[in-house]
Amino acid sequence: MSLDIDFLVILAELLRKNTFDHKLFNAFIETKGAKGFIDHENTMGRKVNRLDIKEEIIKVIQEDEYEDRFQFHMVKKNLDNLIEDIDYLKKNRKLIINKALERVYEIVPEEIKIHTNICLYAGGIDGGFTINRNHVFINYGKYIGQKEEFVKILSHELYHSRQIPLIYKAKFFLRTISSKKRYAYGILGKIIEEGIACLIQHGAILNKDDIIGNLTKSNLSHNKKQFEILNEILLDIRYGNFYKHKFKELNVYSIGYLIVTTVYNEWGVLILDNWTICMDFRNIIKKYNELCIENGFPCYLKPESIGWFI
């Protein structure tokens, strides 16, 4: 498992200079991190090209108070810390990866393999992303000087990189042949996937808000409203409607974390294997709902919302 930090190394060199270095920028923009960042931003609908990045870096170098759209100015403000971190990353690549894997394998069975390439970049609003379960990208700009938090977000993304047996991928596909079920399974699958990843990242008790803001004590306190939205979405799908604006209102991290930690605290880690290994969230949802109804918890999935596909 590799840890690519070329993006950070060259970006630090660029920002240390008083003038823009065209040759250095050309090397920077060809790094795996830069290419991955550009592709990700475009995938997320935030149109970006090489010229956009070049123009913003020039302004960051030339204007001390300039705040660019990619947040390179934040990297510049923390440049000394980044340079220290780069030295640490170079000397401790294996240790960092092993620490992250230790967190993952507290939840994931040891027989489930994780083989991926890790690349660090800086820029944009996201904390990281995973491509095809074999490429992990972490926005290190958010974690400068935060070694423990960096290991935690890396463990989160490594969970998304686990190798799922082909038979369970095939079964999941067969369960989602109809378009209605495909939408419903996609939403609940995303919720449980992120919930388990957040459990790995933060533990069963959220002691500290997520740096990116995806999972905070504040948004956990608003989960009742989130479940109302989720129930509405699932009912809409049942009757042939799918409103994208409603899905954008969902915080899959907070909903998923609540569901996953609730069943984990009650039944332990084995119940999570239903999703981690088998890509089947139905038993997790059923057990969560049973517990909520028994204890009078308001945050649950209504029978009419899920009974048609679970």
Image: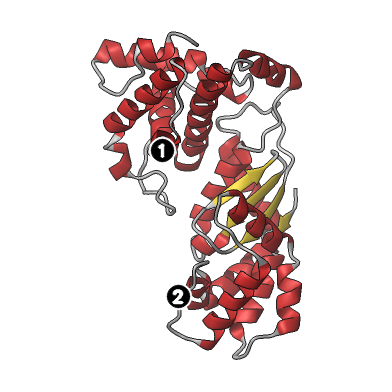
Q: Choose between 158 and 301: the one closer to the eye.
A: 301
From the viewer's perspective, tell me whether residue 226 is left or right of residue 139. Answer: left
Mark 2 is on which residue type? Answer: Glu
**On the image, which quarter does residue 231 sit in?**
top left
Mark 1 is on which residue type? Answer: His
Residue at image coords 67%, 19%: 173
Q: Choose between 308 and 74: the one closer to the eye.
A: 308
What mark, if any, has residue 245 been given in the picture?
A: 1
Q: Report crowding for label 2: few under 14, some 14 to 19, many 20 or more residues within 10 A (C-alpha).
A: some
**Residue 280: horizontal and vertical position, in percent?**
57, 17
Q: Secondary structure at mark 1?
A: helix
Is residue 167 visible from the viewing direction of this image? yes
Q: Secondary structure at mark 2?
A: loop
Residue mark closest to the camera, 2 vs 1: 1
Q: Report crowding for label 1: few under 14, some 14 to 19, many 20 or more residues within 10 A (C-alpha).
A: few
What mark, if any, has residue 208 been given in the picture?
A: none
What mark, if any, has residue 67 been given in the picture?
A: 2
